[in-house]
Amino acid sequence: MSSPEPPPNPEQKPKRRRFTIDFEPLKDRLQIRTWVERLKRDLSTGGYGALVSLAVHGVLMVILGYILFTVRDEGDGDPLQASWSTPGEKAAKSGRKFSPIAMPINIGAGPATAPAPAKTPSEGEADGSQKVGVAPVDVSQALQSRNPRTRSSNLESLGGNSNAENAIKLGLMWLIRQQKTDGHWELHQGYPDPGFSVIRTDTGATALAMLALLGHGNTHKNGDHSEAVGKGLKWLRAIQDPQTGDLHDLRQEEGRNGAFYAHAMATIVLCEALALTGDDELRPSAEKAVKYLLASQHPDNGGWKYRPISKLMVGDLSVTGWALMALHTARMAGIEIPQDDFVRASGFLDSVQVKGLSRYKYEPTSPDSKASPALTAEALLCRQWLGWPKTFPEMVQGVKYVTADENLPAWGGGRRNVYAWYYTSQMLHNIGGPEWKRWNTAVRDAIVKNQITGGSGKAGNDTRGSWHPMSPPGDPFEHSEKGGRLYMTVLCILILETPYRHKPIYSEGEVAISNPQTSGSDR
């Protein structure tokens, strides 16, 4: 094992490194003429064919209009269904196969058109509410606390303790034992209580395991598990589509729910490894992954979904949160992101916010009643990275909602929800203060207490160091029975790593740490 890197000197301002990359727009995979073009062709030739074409397309337009105005997504509030497209997404498709790319992508060159001037908190709207301009926070020191020396010397003050550290190490050892010889992990097999086969994704499993390893300060250059990280990075880069940059391993089955979760998580992995080590061998893969992510955003409404999105599709908050975190991590690695992409993403967050309340729902068309603590915590975390002050009234309201007594961490009674805890822990860690301390103590102790510390360590029966996904049953929207033991174990580890996985966005006595340049990294 190589020696850990020395801690950064707080007196020394980090060097500013900025990388700008231009990409030609990806070509459409399939050139399809619109029904209008076909109708014009038929009319120009005259005859029976034109009448048939007109009648058929008229019926199709009536059917499509009915679908668009009457169908609702039955999966509202259920971000991890064991299926491919959601019912609402299927209804929105017109029957044409869309190109995965809906607009030209030019990473680092700024927006194609200037966004509208952002309002400041003092500028009111017609309904009396306030809006905050989009100003992504400074990310230059975001990963600083992962340095092993910094972490160990400041563990208690950061919010960790020795019990949590021992649980993390035991959990990481379980993950190491599950890694395949070629470097990947699997969700759906290989150990007791795996996930559902229908949501299998080796990219997703590998990215999850790698996030936990990187979160504890391991890289392919340093750390106790550098070899495992190196093998995982090699596997991810090998399965990436060299043309589009897509990292999902089951590209032939477009529309799987896990596809864009997997791609976004793997993008975070590549960008974190690049940011932590400066290894430019990783840069081409990271840049391609970011390119694909940006190309897959809704061109108008700013959300992401299970596949590259078209204008007729609708994004969801669950996938969008992972995609936004990947873009911020790209900034940590020195990859500039156009401001317009963040502005549109902020607009999507507006569309899923319950009016008058700082609560959030799954999709814009979801009923307001579907707002949940999990989705609210995820949205507020996105808002923080996009520049919301922690004292902004809607942030304060949201914090009160997710930390109400009925939402505090409890392992049993159907209340355990590691999916919600993952986002809530990060959001409260940024805010700090009594809310964070109260939450962190409760969630940390519950997770440590319920880790399996004994049992078998043999392949196929290995449980030692993991967490059981279904005993006891958690909240229905935890989805631990679908994700399985690896999903459950990684989320528990990531929650325990929260005190040092990212440096808090807000400092004591400061309202916000915003970067007025709004795009790019200050590395």
Image: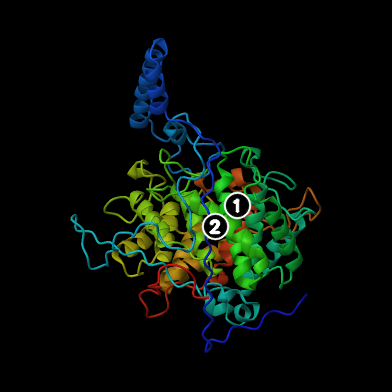
Q: Is residue 353 above or below residue 120?
A: above
The x and y percentages for residue 475 are 51, 47
Q: Residue at x 75, y 60 (%)?
A: 231
Is 132 in front, or is 442? Answer: 132
- Residue pointed to by mark 2: 290
The x and y percentages for residue 179 are 75, 55
Q: Quadrant of the N terminus?
A: bottom right
> Residue 245 got which mark?
1
Labelled pair 1, 2 in contact (Cβ < 8 Å): yes
Q: Is residue 121 above or below residue 59?
A: below
Q: Is residue 384 left or right of residue 460?
A: left
Name the amino acid, label 1.
Gly
Residue 138 placement: quadrant = bottom left
Coloring scheme used: rainbow
Name the amino acid, label 2.
Val
Q: Residues within 10 Å of mark 2 (few under 14, many from 20)?
A: many
Element at label 1? loop
Residue 183 placement: quadrant = bottom right
Is 16 in front, or is 72? Answer: 16
